[in-house]
Each structure stands twice: as C-alpha cells, then as structure tokens.
Amino acid sequence: MPEFSTLTQAFEWFLENVYPHLPSEEKYKLRDAKYDFYKEGNKVSVNRMNRILAEYSDFEPVFRINSQK
C-alpha cells in the first residue's frame, strides 16, 4: 500500500490509479469531486476527500510525531 505525506497526495493518487477502474456508475458519482480537485480555484474539502477514500479504498490515516529532545 503506498504511503503519502498529505491527504491531497493520497487523493490525487486515488484519482489517477483507482478511479479509472471503477464502474461507470461509481465514476458518475465522483465526477464532481474529480472536476473540483483538478479545476483551478475549486477545492475539495478534507472531509469529502476522507469520505471518498474511505468508501472506495482501504484508506488508513496515519499520524506520526518526531520529537527532537
């Protein structure tokens, strides 16, 4: 499973690698999110990206803290 530094990177990977293999009816549901993601000036909210990734993939958010002591 690939790992990403940001949710935006993970969502972009999803659109490029998972989205093309979805059935047409699922693509139709996600077309607005894809358009908003790639259209300059439009944005996809963090909640929307999380919801889509959780629904259509095995998505696990990871948080790491590196403290310098």
Image (tube, rainbow, N blue to C red):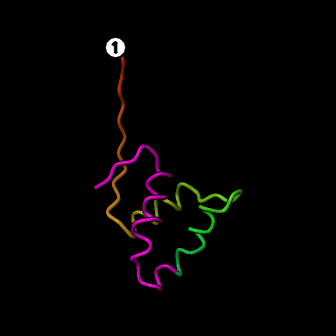
Q: Which residue is at a point 36% across and 22% down the rendered structure image?
A: 67
Image-based side of 68 in relation to 27, left or right: left
Residue neighbourhood size for the residue with mark 1, other residues' Cα within 10 Å, grouped as few (<14), some (14–19), many (≥20): few
Q: Which residue is at a point 36% across and 17% down the rendered structure image?
A: 68
Residue 10 part of the magenta-drawn span? yes
**In the foreground, 52 or 14:** 14
Image-based side of 32 in relation to 58, left or right: right
Q: Which residue is at a point 54% across and 54% down the rendered structure image?
A: 46
The percent position of residue 21, horizontal first and vertical second, equals: 39, 76
Asked if 69 appears above or below 65 in the picture, the reply is above
Q: Quadrant of the C terminus?
A: top left
The percent position of residue 44, horizontal first and vertical second, equals: 59, 59
Q: Under tag 1, what secondary structure?
A: loop
Please state the extent of the stretch shown in magenta in the rendering.
1-27
Residue 30 part of the magenta-drawn span? no
- The residue that label 1 is drawn on is 69
Q: Amino acid at mark 1?
A: Lys
The percent position of residue 23, horizontal first and vertical second, equals: 41, 83
Q: Which residue is at a point 63% across and 65% down the rendered structure image?
A: 36
